[in-house]
Image (spheres, rainbow, N blue to C red):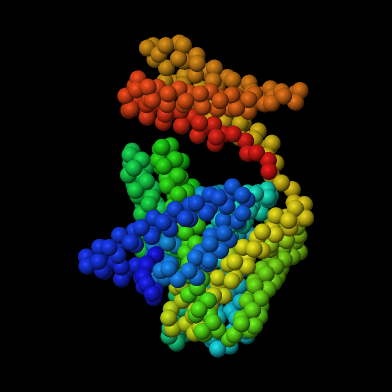
Amino acid sequence: MLSLAAPGPTTLASITASTASAPLDTRLAVIWVVAFVLVTVTITGISGRVGWSAPIVLVAVGAVVSFISAVPRIGIDPELVLYGVIPPLLFAAAIRTSFRDVRARNDSILMLSIGLVAFTVVAIGFAAWILMPAIGLAAAFAFGAVVAPTDAVAVTAIAGRINLPRRVVTILEGESLLNDATALVALNASIAAIVAVVNPWVVAGDFVIAVVGGVAVGLAVGWVLAAIRKRLHAPVLDTSLSLITPYLAFIAAQSFGGSGVLAVVIAGLFLGYRSPSIQSAEARVAERLNWRTIDYLLQNAVFLFIGLNLSAIVEGALKNGPGVWPTVGICLGILLALVVVRFIWVFAITLLYRRGPRFLRSRGWSWRNAAAVSSAGIRGVVTLIAVFLLPPETPQRSFLQFLAFVVVVGTLLEGLLLPTIIRALKLPAPNYDQEHQERFALMAEAEQAGVDELANHLTDSDEEEVVERLRMNSAFLEEAIANPPEDGREPRLVAYTRLRKTMIAAQRQAVLQARREGRYQEPAVLSVLAAIDAEETALKLAAPRKKA
């Protein structure tokens, strides 16, 4: 994705081609990549500590650095972005999305991820064409597809911080996952219209083939890999297959004329839903941590990368744009159009739910929920990446890249107001006490199932003390659920979790002290630390979520 050169931009391909003749340039490129990651991690970490929006800070830092003459230009290869960056980003979001929740709210999610995207592409396309007639309708619709999808990470972060109702969170997360695929399919059709004269019926047919092919390939890849991974016993092999899955789904779908992005999303949803039955616990933990790391680095690195491109984007906009004040007017017009379009569509389908057929009325949402969903139109990584996929033939391509940059920054700034808007709407927060009780009740059921199964596997050689300890653990959990304290005291399981964490911390310190004293060999130390970490992780997953 990155390439370094001076004074003009280049691509990663050119650096790779010159590796044999210029090892110094290769080393310099590696140094810059390492520095890039360090800067990204540092800025994101500091932003989180002080409560700032990490994407905005990353863009701002990159923008400032881009105007320093000593910093080399960073070029981008659209093919590398399409095949190397978008698949892992979509897959990382898909495997952590609840398929059950998406299915439960599929009508609302489809209304937004397909209907709203199509409406946005058309509305913003015409708005851009009216504001900039010279670019033509094809390029205008392509730009509409670029700015149509909302950002999953930004929406999730905000939803977690302001305690939105579960239904609203599910709809926003499902929308921001699936609308990426819809927007990129629409972008592909618009690009075809830019580079050649096409028949609308051919475009519509290609669109259908892309959707059907993408879904079919995604399901096929998910099913095949699920069957293979179910037979793997080594977590490292399972994780290795997981890492290539988005590329496999994407390339296979593209080869058959289907939508690669849709195939990645479907495969991710399928494998994420099946993971408890096809993977070991160790493999699931490894996969979760690996994809969280990849998603974290790619998401935040893209914001920094776009900031570093700002000087070139501004230079191109000034050279090919209509002038300063017309540019300001166009930017404000596009931002306003995006806000209005989203509000119109969301409130229109809300009216349909509340006044339409009976089967829709039973699934309707409130006007306050509609206002919350309408306000969450934050654009992010996919918009920043997609605008670089516009072909060189696109009229005023550099100016459209600048507009996309403005849209992302503008909607991120708008997102800073979202917590205030949500609090003003006084939406009911999730019932964490009920979720807490449901979590422990389910744990009690699982424990009872374990006790029932224990009786079927006892042998004469099993010591009674071991069996009794296993039964005592289950009895304690069942008793704590059945008889919660009535005098306002801390629930027993909460107290157990708190005290057990204190013991675990002391255990870890004791093991580390023994390591420093050299009293045990390293394999024993690592094994005990891994066991302690596993129990601490289980306690963390079972602990109730804290109220914000």
- Locate residue 68 relative to residue 377 in the image: left or right: left
Where is residue 104? Give x, y as percent: 60, 52
Comparing 208 with 57, the one in front is 57
In the rendered image, the vertical position of residue 146 relative to residue 424, given as above or below: below
For the question of whether residue 204 can be seen, the reply is no
Q: Quadrant of the N terminus?
A: bottom left
- Locate residue 498 relative to residue 70 in the image: left or right: right
- Which residue appears at 53% of the width and 53% of the height? 44
Where is residue 19? Give x, y as percent: 25, 65
Point out the residue furthest to the left here.
Answer: 20
- Which residue appears at 45% of the width and 14% of the height? 466
In the rendered image, the vertical position of residue 432 relative to residue 204, given as above or below: above
Comparing 387 with 124, the one in front is 387
- Locate residue 418 relative to residue 242 in the image: left or right: right
Comparing 58 with 188, the one in front is 58
Where is residue 502? Give x, y as percent: 56, 25
Number of marks in the rendered image: 0
The image quadrant that residue 254 belongs to is bottom left
For the question of whether residue 140 can be seen, the reply is yes
- Locate residue 122 relative to residue 529 in the image: left or right: right
- Which residue appears at 32% of the width and 24% of the height? 521
Q: Quadrant of the C terminus?
A: top right
- Which residue appears at 59% of the width and 24% of the height? 499
In the rendered image, the vertical position of residue 74 relative to residue 502, given as above or below: below
Point out the residue furthest to the bottom here.
Answer: 134
Where is residue 489? Give x, y as percent: 72, 24
